[in-house]
Amino acid sequence: MIKHEWIEKGYIDEAVPAGVDLKAEIRRLCKEKNAVVLAHYYTDGSIQDVADFVGDSLALAQIAEKTTAEILVMCGVHFMAETNKILSPEKKVLIPDLNAGCSLAESCPANELAKFKQEHPGYKVIAYVNTSAAVKALTDIVVTSTNARAVVESFPKDEKIIFAPDKNLGGYLNAVTNRSMLLWNGGCHVHEQFSIEKIVELKSTHPGAKVLAHPECKSGVLALADFIGSTAAILAFAEKSEATEFIVATESGILHEMMKRCPEKRFIPVPPTTGPCACNECGYMRLNTLEKLYNTLKHEWPTVELDEELRKAAKAPIARMLELSK
Ligand code: 13P
Ligand code: SF4
């Protein structure tokens, strides 16, 4: 039985009995229930190590669509779990903590985007996957940072386009595709924090290091980057590059996979502008813990549910993206 206090909290905080090997129990429950655990590169290393699949937001959406598992547990943030449910309504989609939101998704409420669309008739709408289902339902096509450039370039050069919600990614896309899409004024609280001064400092103390940046970073950070790309693209670049040191301007959870793939290379996370806090960690991603994952699998709650009309409306622009990304 799901307790009222868990519903209020949005996660299960039942104490795990002492001596339980959480990783072994999670794997056992997955096997018993035909469940898979999907984890984003920004989650804690312990979550990535126990997951069936670790990936960027595009790869996780593609896996969710294809897997034959009956239960998907999305260790990431809410819009990722919601995307899984949109693509696989017949599956039970679980999220260890319903509070795992996304500041970028929150920066674009559906009613405000609907109003903006009305004020700009004749515009196509491209939305980053970091949005709610209600926002996706208002758009023509969804993008992730892996396929954003290709999707934008699939539109005629003179097409009038609104890009939402990330102004940094949108500005970067405008620059590389030579377009002038109208940009929604949204941003990610983690990627907006990276310090330009500290990157300059790190470059001078590590002259051979390559700067890797996610396109959600501010334009000043992107201007200093040797490579700009999604989490998967950044990983692939680091693997292939002959450089041995990298200055990393994205959420620091990615260092776990970087060090796994390239143990001989050195990865230096860029600190945020504000003091010694852990702002290069996404607090939402870090709400995923082994205890919550175990309890989610055990009790099969919290689930992600969607109204069927909304799900269908949000699916169309995601399906268009997946078709273009095959
Ligand atoms: P990726 O699509 O590169 O995995 O990024 C997701 C995200 O939330 C970035 O902040
Ligand atoms: Fe959202 Fe930023 Fe966290 Fe990515 S890092 S999930 S964009 S808040």
Image (tube, rainbow, N blue to C red):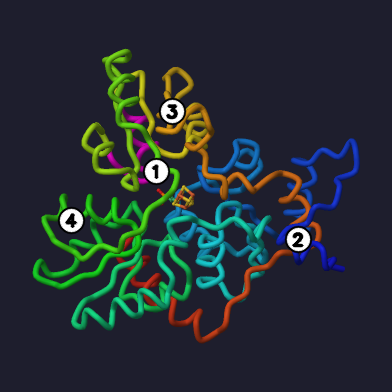
Residue type marked 1: His
**Is the residue indicated by label 4 positioned so its CB lies within 8 Å of ligand 1?**
no
Q: Residue at x 32, y 71 (%)?
A: 141
Q: Earlier in the sequence, mark 1 or mark 2?
A: 2
Instruction: Tell me the residue that label 2 is attached to.
Output: 33
Q: Closer to the camera: disc 1 or disc 2? A: 1
Mark in the foreground, 3 or 1: 1
Q: Nearer the viewer, mark 2 or mark 3?
A: 3
The reply to whether the C-beta atoms of the residues labelled 2 and 4 are less than 8 Å apart is no
Residue at position x 68%, y 55% in the image: 96
Mark toward the viewer: 2 or 4: 4
Q: Element at badge 4?
A: helix
Q: Which residue is mark 4?
A: 174
Q: Is mark 1 within 8 Å of ligand 2?
A: yes
- For marks 3 and 4, the one nearer the N-term is 4
x and y percentages locating residue 60 in the rendered image: 49, 55
Q: CA distance from mark 2 to mark 4?
A: 46 Å
Position of residue 94 measured from the top left corner of the image (x, y, whole percent): 66, 62
As drawn, 165 above or below 319: above
Taking the image as drawn, is residue 44 in sight?
yes
Asked whether, in this view, residue 306 is left or right of residue 238, the answer is right
Q: Which mark is residue 102?
A: none
**Tag 4: residue type?**
Asn
User: Residue under circle 1?
Assistant: 191
Of label 4 and label 1, which has the lower sequence position?
4
The quarter of the picture where the N terminus appears is: bottom right
Q: What stretch of residues is rendered in magenta?
A: 228-241
Q: Nearer the viewer, residue 75 or 27?
A: 75
In the rendered image, which residue does mark 3 sit on?
269
- State the SS at label 1: helix
